[in-house]
Image: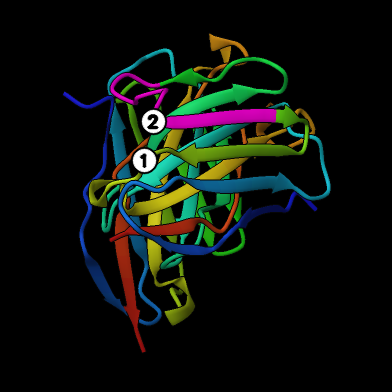
Amino acid sequence: GAVVSQHPSRVICKSGTSVKIECRSLDFQATTMFWYRQFPKQSLMLMATSNEGSKATYEQGVEKDKFLINHASLTLSTLTVTSAHPEDSSFYICSARTRLSRALGNEQFFGPGTRLTVL
Amino acid sequence: QKEVEQDPGPLSVPEGAIVSLNCTYSNSAFQYFMWYRQYSRKGPELLMYTYSSGNKEDGRFTAQVDKSSKYISLFIRDSQPSDSATYLCAMTDVNAGNNRKLIWGLGTSLAVNP
């Protein structure tokens, strides 16, 4: 149980285009979803937190107009990187939290990640 | 000063060795402590979690929390090549409500050599 999928797993796009990444909780309802980015050999950097039906809360320094997050249902969140540039190239990972998880609902279940390369 | 400090390594050990991974933190409000394992180009997966101080054992893994020293450890006994991965510590203040988030260490890269 508690499987999170991400699509696509890898995307290469031209500078200036927009890219949408989907994150789905396959067998549970996620009360909260998180979006992270990770550079090579670095830790996870939280970008934003989203609760279903409400606006995402962005971390300091993350442009909300650049990284659009939509959490339309309890099983789906999307991250759209608008007008992507080479510096946006990174590994984007989503995670989901549910009240039914271990650790009193503090555990986050992670997707496999999406590797974005902007040319 | 970062909220969570973790030596990134890399750490290289022979198969069968006991591995000790550590994190220190500065926020005394943290109560839940977790260790995640991340294989290359994959999302992290939860290995162990502990609440407050004490030890917790699960197979070859032992998680230890010393809140008085703000120090947590993960021990791996009889390490195997399949344990080669990056180990990230994470912690949270459970009183922070729905938007509570995990604060992450940098991750320690571990290589277990056969």
Disc 1 crowd, CA 10 A, few/some/many (<14, 14-19, 20+): some
Instruction: State the image quarter where residue A62 is shown.
Output: top left
Residue closest to the eye, B41 or B88: B41
Residue B96 at x, y = what percent? 53, 10
In the image, taking residue A15 as reference, residue A32 lies left or right, namely right
Q: Main secondary structure of the magenta part?
A: loop
- Chain at tag 1: A
- In the image, residue A66 lies in the stretch drawn in magenta: yes
Q: Is residue A53 visible?
A: yes
Specify the amino acid type for callout 2.
Lys
Give the quadrant of the C terminus of chain A: bottom left
- The residue type indicated by label 1 comes to Ser
Q: Are marks 2 and 1 on the same chain?
A: yes
The picture places residue A92, in percent across and down from the top left corner, at 44, 49
Q: Secondary structure at mark 1?
A: loop
Q: Residue at x 53, y 19 (%)?
A: B100
- For residue A66, the mark is 2
Res. B16 mark: none
The image quadrant that residue A64 belongs to is top left
Contact? badges 2 and 1 (CB < 8 Å): yes
Q: Secondary structure at mark 2?
A: loop
Residue A58, given in percent of the width and then of the height, sits at 44, 20
Q: Which residue is mark 1?
A: A83
Neighbor class of circle 2 (other Cα within 10 Å; few <14, some 14-19, many 20+) is some
Chain letter belonging to callout 2: A
Magenta-highlighted residues = A59-71
Q: Residue at x 38, y 21 (%)?
A: A59
Which residue is at 62% across, 32% downward? A33
- The image shows residue B4 at horizontal and vertical percentages of 29, 31
In terms of sequence position, does the residue under pointer 2 or pointer 1 come before the other? 2
Mark 2–mark 1 distance (CA, rounded to whole Å): 7 Å
